Amino acid sequence: MDLPTAWNLDDKSTYLSVDSSGLRVNHEGPNLYGTIRANHPIPPQCKLFYFEVDIINEGSYRNITIGLCEKSFNLNGSGLGK
């Protein structure tokens, strides 16, 4: 069973960059948002799943949301804020 262990380098918003470890994300662009998925989904058989995120710099807008989404969620904006 594959568990999420890092960010997905190829499954992210346009204006996000991920370091080579897959653990650090940086926002680089004009958009006010960025979305990224983990390298593996949380398996349905996991009845409890724990993760941590450290916010190193909240940026000038100080607006950060952390959550879960389905694979069909558009990472470049559709559905954000709804």
Image (spheres, rainbow, N blue to C red):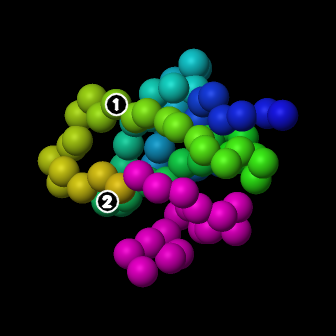
* Dot 2 alpha-carbon crowd within 10 angstroms: few under 14, some 14 to 19, many 20 or more: few
Identify residue type, mark 1.
Asp
Mark number, residue 29: none
Identify residue type, mark 2.
Leu
The mark that comes first in sequence, 1 or 2, is 2
Q: Residue at x 79, y 33 (%)?
A: 2
The image quadrant of residue 8 is: top right
Residue 34 shown left or right of residue 76 in the figure: left
Q: Position of residue 34 (x, y in %)?
A: 43, 54
Circles 1, 2 touching at the beta carbon (< 8 Å): no
Work out whether residue 74 or residue 47 is closer to the camera in this orientation and state it.
Answer: 47
Residue 34 shown left or right of residue 7 in the figure: left
Residue 30 in sight from this viewpoint? no
Q: Main secondary structure of the magenta part?
A: loop
Image quadrant where one finds the N terminus: top right
- Residue matched to label 1: 54
- Residue matched to label 2: 32
Q: Residue at x 53, y 37 (%)?
A: 50
The image quadrant of residue 26 is: top left
Instruction: Provide the residue span drawn in magenta.
Output: 66-82
